[in-house]
Amino acid sequence: MDYLLENLETERLLFRKLNPSDFDTWLAFYKDPESSELWNAALSPEEACKQWFEEQFSRYDNKSGGMHVLTDKKTKAFVGQCGLLVLDYNNSTEIALAFSLLPKFQHKGYAEEAALKCKEYAFKTLKAGSLIALISPSDMLSEQVATAIGMEWEDTNIYNDKIVNIFRLKK
């Protein structure tokens, strides 16, 4: 199954695969104090970003989805990342929606726009029965996006040694 979203479009955004040349642009995400509070704060921004890139390239190679760069179709600006990830969660394989935006592009509707496109792809193309999102309990913006696209809180659990809120949307 193809979980990659390369060349998908929304009204304002284009999805493309992450490239090594995107490193310096995405490093700003890890240098942002609010973002680093949510993920990989124990690592330096450079180490966390390097780990992130390696994980995405591994996902591409292993056909387990991966994050995609979101570019603004008008300005060509790198807005953030969004994608579908194949995860093992609670002894089952799940399709998870994930998204992160560079701080200067938050609060502009980009995350919801990209998340809606991922939701459409998951249900229409992949014929998924449900879609989950694993969200840090302190990440209120991501929880708002999840609920805006129809997801509902299901549980709070531990995933990869982190406490996360599980949101789910069933077909």
Image: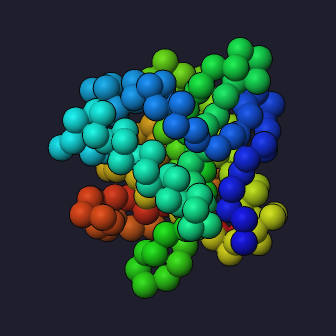
Q: Where on the picture, by quarter, is residue 128?
A: bottom right
Point 31% across, 26% down: residue: 31
Q: Is residue 94 above or below residue 65?
A: below
User: Foreground residue, 153 or 118?
Assistant: 118
User: Foreground residue, 112 or 37?
Assistant: 37
Quarter of the picture containing the C terminus is bottom right
The answer, for residue 63, to whether it is visible in the render is yes
Give the side of residue 134 with respect to residue 14, left or right: left
Q: Is residue 43 above or below residue 77?
A: below
- Residue 139 x, y percent position in the rendering: 37, 42
Q: Where on the picture, by quarter, is residue 86?
A: bottom right
The answer, for residue 107, to whether it is visible in the render is no
User: Foreground residue, 123 or 49?
Assistant: 49
Point 79% across, 38% down: residue: 9
Point 37% across, 39% down: residue: 49
- Residue 113 x, y percent position in the rendering: 68, 37
